Amino acid sequence: MKFKIKRETDCHGNNRPVRKAKMMPFEKWDVRSCTEEQYEQRHAPKFGSWRSQGKNHSVIKGRNWIKRQREDELCWGIEINTPEDLIAIIHECEANLNISEDTIFIEDEDLEYGIPKFEKAPKRIKGTIVSFDL
């Protein structure tokens, strides 16, 4: 299975996140939380008609949201086909991994919030800053 792979410390994806990563094309989707008619009223004057860009236009069932496929984007990617492949990535990264449907996000130990960690850095519980060590 093909996954995008990103490091917390490399916001722009300029550096190879792990040795086995390669630049690969990934599907890119544009999803809007409105109907096509609402999009046309609000956004078409500035961005053009919803159907003027992309392909595979459709409605997300049960939500009345619209989506369209854009040009594929090149990102760092990795193939993981067995549990052993995943274990090898975990050992190489030596960091926490967040794995979603199509992305592996590496939480680097030396950075938090995109800035270096210090002794007095805020502590985080479920993504919220709760206190400072003084």
Image: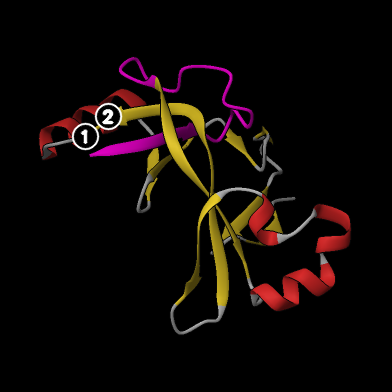
Quarter of the image with the N terminus in it: top left
Left/right of residue 91 with respect to residue 19 in the rendered view? left
Residue type at tag 2: Ile
Among numbered discs 1 and 2, the one appearing first in the sequence: 1
Q: Position of residue 55 (x, y in %)?
A: 52, 50
Q: Is residue 61 above or below residue 94?
A: below
Q: Is residue 131 above or below residue 66?
A: above
Q: Are marks 1 and 2 in contact (CB under 8 Å)?
A: yes
- Residue found at x 57% / y 74%: 65
Q: Position of residue 99 (x, y in %)?
A: 36, 48
Which residue corresponds to mark 2?
89
* Quarter holding residue 95: top left
Question: What's the magenta region?
Answer: 1-22
Q: Residue furthest bottom?
A: 62
Residue 19 on the magenta segment: yes
Residue type at tag 1: Ile
Which secondary structure type mostly characterizes the magenta part of the structure?
loop
Q: CA distance from mark 1 to mark 2?
A: 9 Å
